[in-house]
Amino acid sequence: MWNVLKTFFFLAILSILFIIVGNLIGGKTGATIALFMALTMNFIAYFFSDKIVLATSGAIPVSKEEDPELHAIVEEVARRAGIPKPKVYMIPVETPNAFATGRNPKNGVVAVTVGLRRFLTPEELKGVIAHEIAHIKNRDILISTIAAVLVGAITYLVHMAQWALMFGGFHRDDDERENPLTLIATFVAIIIVPITATLIQLAISRSREFLADETGAKIIKNPGALARALEKLENWNRAYPLDVNPAHAQMYIVNPLSSKSLFKLFSTHPPIEERIAKLLKMAKEVI
């Protein structure tokens, strides 16, 4: 529940930030244009992001005949979660990792690497599948898209302000030149707002990872299996990082990139130690 509340709190902050910046930088007209452009781009991303990420990761469909055990696990976990069985894809790399995509449960996809099948026990594999199906059940693709729309709109507004200041000054809708205090506030907004919006977007991503861990553990009633899987995956991905688009890194169950953020705030994933600790705490409780 706490992670759900955090998500809606962060989305509310992004919305408020957009309204404030829109009126400060572009007025109602500028804010409307920025929001329309962000909605258009993210509308396309929402409907086609699954195809894009599957193609760029090299994932290919896997039939029941090719991997009956994997399909059985996906089917069982999806049934427990109360959603349709997602499509199953395989990524031909040895580093164990996985991600889920699809704009809603009817269009869900679970993709796992060859290494995930090779190095995890059946119970650990079930834990990973449960985490990914939890993302689909919780509609995290939709939530990520909403956050991206708001952050994108804010970014457009800031770019508009930069161009306006470069070419002769800054004007509002009423065509009156801004007073010095407003210009100072605009300069500050240009520097601080994009960073703040990005940090909030990353915070939303981390909160959804915690929620997917919790939801997945409850689905299979085995938090310990997911905790063990996360530890294995983290160690492998640190030693043998995947060659993935950084924009898609947040989709994977553990960070697939070798580079580590200097600060926790700039990470797409929560610290693995915190995730494991929460799962082990759940394991001691009655689910």
Image (tube, helix red, strand yellow):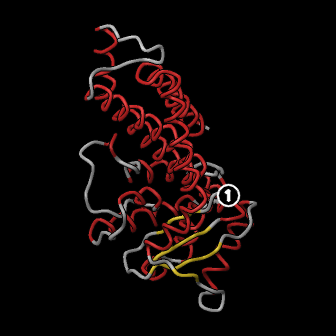
Q: With respect to residue 2, does 112 lie above or below?
A: below
Q: Amino acid at mark 1?
A: Asn
Q: How many marks?
A: 1
Query: Residue 81, percent across and down?
Result: 71, 60
- Judged left or right of residue 248, residue 107 is right
In the image: residue 114, left or right of residue 127: left
At label 1, counting other C-alpha atoms closer than 10 Å, the crowd grade (few under 14, some 14-19, many 20 or more) is some
Nearest the eye: 277 or 34? 34
Viewer-nearest residue: 47 or 26: 26
**Quadrant of res 255:** bottom left
Q: Residue at point 36% right, 64% down?
A: 245
Q: Position of residue 246 (x, y in %)?
A: 35, 59
Residue at the (70%, 73%) spot, across then down: 75
Residue placed under numbered mark 1 in the picture: 104
Q: Is residue 154 above or below residue 188?
A: below
Mark 1: secondary structure: loop
In the displayed structure, would residue 232 be above or below residue 70? Answer: above
Residue 168 position, x and y percent, is 27, 23
* Residue 5 found in image quarter: top right
Q: Residue at x 66, y 59 (%)?
A: 219
- The foreground one among 159 and 136 is 159
The answer to whether 153 is drawn above or below residue 275 in the figure is above
Q: Which residue occupies 39% across, 54% down?
A: 272
Q: How far across and down, in percent of the image, does residue 57 sit?
A: 43, 73
